[in-house]
Image: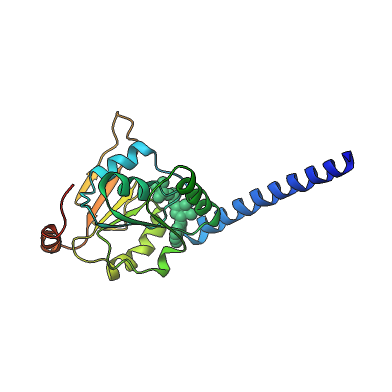
Amino acid sequence: MIDLAFTILVFAVLAVVIIVILALFTSFIVAVFGGGPFVPTPTKEVKRILKHADIRKGDRLYDIGAGDGRFIHYSTKLYGAKATGFEIDPFVYMLARLKQILLKWKGEMVRSDFRTHSLKDADIVICYMLPNTLKKFKTKFEKELRPGCKVISYTFKVGNWKPIKILPKNKKGHKKRIYIYSVRDNSAKTRTKKKTTSKRK
Ligand SMILES: C[S@@+](CC[C@H](N)C(=O)[O-])C[C@H]1O[C@@H](n2cnc3c(N)ncnc32)[C@H](O)[C@@H]1O
């Protein structure tokens, strides 16, 4: 009996070790070939970013590397956005799904590389990715994002784009800069047109 319990224990420990090694390996691969590893934005900063995102009810919001889905959750809950988060790392995706199931976090999570999806209908794109990868993603953004779409990047600039606003770091615990971009200049036209069909919250 003790032998059986010991064998089960050994297998359980082995299973945990294998899962941890797989998770670390996946995270390393994502860091190298994707947009960077999972580092969550503090909730306080998530709310600060969303406050400046000018979200209207029904706006299409994407988080291109959604992590545990916090931007998706709060933009849906607080502003009524139609939010989708892409997450390439299966383990981080599982964490996001767990939060949706256990904590009733809102929004749609998709386990996928965001580069395989079109962002054509986006009103707001959130990114927290490494600068050298953001530079690469810029081409996709420029090809697909429609005028007036806002791109908000936490901590890092998007290549040589000119932000319309930079939220500074400050003493209130805001430790990083936030870069807000608007896709091309004729943006106002598209956004004004939309205003008539969707109510501002
Ligand atoms: C720095 S974390 C940010 C997580 C979340 N957006 C936040 O701010 O809390 C970046 C996330 O993007 C994911 N990621 C990296 N490259 C990706 C890609 N090409 N497609 C989808 N997700 C990606 C990583 O797995 C990681 O979880």
Residue at (47% x, 50% y) in the render = 96
Locate the N terminus by quadrant: top right
User: Quick one: 12 or 64, which is closer to the camera?
Assistant: 12
The number of discs equals 0
State the image quarter where residue 171 is shown: top left
Q: Does residue 35 appear anywhere in the picture? A: no
Q: How far across and how far down the image is residue 93, in percent? A: 50, 54
> Foreground: 44 or 131?
44
Front residue of this view, candidates 176 and 159: 176
- Ligand 1 visible in quadrant: bottom left
In the image, residue 145 above or below residue 199: below
Q: Quadrant of residue 143?
A: bottom left
Answer yes or no: is residue 165 visible: yes
175 to the left or right of 193 = right
x and y percentages locating residue 136 in the rendered image = 38, 64
Left or right: 76, with 189 as reference point? right
Q: Is residue 17 left or right of residue 85?
A: right
Q: Is residue 13 above or below residue 86?
A: above
Residue farthest to the top, as pictured: 171
Q: Residue at x 16, y 50 (%)?
A: 200
- Left or right: 20, with 181 as reference point: right
Q: Residue at x 60, y 51 (%)?
A: 24
Specify the color scheme: rainbow
Q: Residue 176: percent from the left, percent from the top?
A: 34, 40
Residue, x 24% and y 50% (percent of image)?
A: 180
Q: Give percent across and percent down for residue 72.
A: 36, 51
Location of residue 64 (image quadrant): bottom left
